[in-house]
Structure formats: C-alpha cells, structure tokens
Amino acid sequence: MKLYKTSKGIILQFKEEYFIFQGDWDGMINAETLSADLVENSKHADKLSIQQVETLLDEYLLPPIGSQEVWAAGVTYMRSRDARMEEAKAGGGGDFYDKVYAAPRPELFFKALAHRVAGHKQSVNIREDSTWNVPEPELTLFINAAGKIIGYTIGNDMSSRSIEGENPLYLPQAKVYERSAALGPCLYVSEESIPSDTSISMTIYRKDKTCFKDSIRIDRMKRSLEELAGYLYRGCDFPNGSFLMTGTCLVPENDFTLMENDIVEINIEHIGTLVNEVKVYRKGNV
C-alpha cells in the first residue's frame, strides 16, 4: 500500500485502486495497526479515477511528513565510509569515519524539522558558502512512537561536503539548513520488511544531460534497519513517530558538485521516484 499526503486529503493506493479520505496524518500513520486500519478505511473512502489521482498528485502533493523529526544515519555503507575519509583528510578527521563504520554504535544525527523538508517536484537547496555539494539518496524509515518500523519512503540527504570535510565538528552546518532534506513521493506501508534486495538508483541531470547515474541494493548496508531504529530510540521519545534516513552508497566522484538547476531523480523499488530541482539557498529565498 502507498499513502500520499496532499492538501486535498490523504490518498491511499491499494490493490491498483485509489481512495481519498480526510484525517489527521500524524495520528493515522503512528497507529500500531496501520496496514489493517488502511484496509478498513478503503471500505468507506471515496474511490478516485486515474485522472483524478494524476491531478491531485500533480497539483496538491505534499511531503509525507507531519510533525515528525527527520534523523539520519551516516557511514552505513563501505563507499560512504571511503568518501567521508577522503573529504576529511585535510581536516585531520579521516580516522573518525573508519572507526564509526566498524563500531558497535552507529552514527546518528538530527537532520530536519518538517518545515525544512521538500517534497516530490519541489526544490532542494545547496549552501551559498559551500563549494562541494552532493545529494545522498537514502531508504528512509518511518518509525512509530513505539519504535516499530511501519513504513518507508525515499530520502534525499543533501550534504555540503566541503564544510564537513573541513572539520567533522561542522557536520550540523553541512547537513542542517533550509530544504537540505527531501522526502517522498509517498509512504510505502507493508506488514513485511522491505526486501533486502531492494534497489536504489540515482540519476542527476544537468541541462537535459545525464551527469551521474548509479544504483545499489540495500543489502550492501553494514547495519540492519532494526538496529538503526533501535539506537535512535534508545535516548529519544517521538510521540508522533520519526523518519530515519539510513545512509547512502551512491556517492559521485570527487570532482563532481551540484549546480543550480540540476535535477536529482531517486528511485527505490516498491516506493517510487522522488524528483527535486537544485537551488542555491540565499537568505530570504525558500
């Protein structure tokens, strides 16, 4: 099942059919029995035609988040570890990333509040004071208040590599700024865990030309999804649940940096495709 949040209501895709209903997003997705609740809702909701769905998703789609916080995990893939070590050499912090990759405790950091999150076909930002910027495509978990993984979405963890590489203590500035995160297009809900052979792919377009394209399977991740969720909930309560980006292995070469008007397209099997245009954040623009 897929849930789409729009300004006109909540759209449920279930068994190739679409339904729309009104409700409190936070309360609904945080339910312990979300899958069963959605099946029940479909029995009483208004059915939509394909044309109606296309219009609603094209004109009124929102990121699938309410009042939740977005957190992120770092260095969960070998390629990410290598990239972080490369960028941190000048600042003397390369060893930190090697150690955290092998450590029992994962790297977890706060990423965004809902008002800083972009949705599908909305713009994401790069910082004006950063010279090296990349998108990071990540399988993103929705974890309910009880710490159970309820659903999945696509995340784009925008990163200022030049800032983080200068000094690991600059991580919050490299990761947390206006529209430094994107989620969407939907929340994929399943009673079973997303398959371990699920593929993530990313394509970056510049002036209609492909300048990066690659894919990876999530079974290349060093840590399990349940492990990452468990560590996040060890020290924090999330009354309305939380979103957790689980790290990336798709890292462009070191001579690549995003430019304004680039298009980032991320696809994850079972979930869909998240598309964002890149803008340079300057004070006052959104």
Image: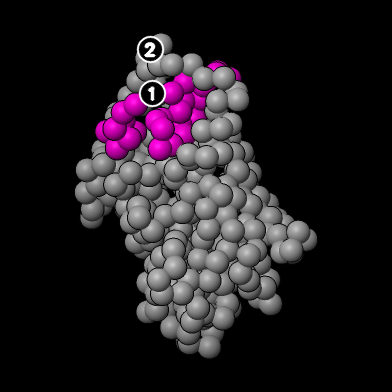
Tell which of 194 and 120 is nearer to you.
Answer: 120
- The span from disc 2 to disc 1 (Cα, nearest Å) is 9 Å
First to last magenta residue range: 1-30
Residue at the image position 60 percent from the left and 43 percent from the top: 273
Up the image or down, 126 lies above or below 110; here it is below
In the picture of the structure, the residue carrying the numbered disc 2 is 44
List x then y, in percent, for residue 147: 30, 41
Residue at the image position 55 percent from the left and 25 percent from the top: 52
Is 231 left, or right, of 190 in this rendering? Answer: left
- Mark before the other along the chain sequence, 2 or 1: 1
Residue 57 visible in the shown view: yes
Mark 1, secondary structure of its residue:
strand
Tell which of 45 and 249 is nearer to you.
Answer: 45
List x then y, in percent, for residue 120: 53, 47
For the residues labelled 2 and 1, say whether their Cβ atoms are less than 8 Å apart: yes
Is 281 left, or right, of 218 in this rendering? Answer: left
In the picture of the structure, the residue carrying the numbered disc 1 is 21
Which image quarter is the C terminus in? bottom left
Up the image or down, 67 lies above or below 160; here it is above
How packed mark 1 is, by other alpha carbons closer than 10 Å (few <14, some 14-19, many 20 or more), is some
Q: Amino acid at mark 1?
A: Phe
Is 66 left, or right, of 167 in this rendering? Answer: left
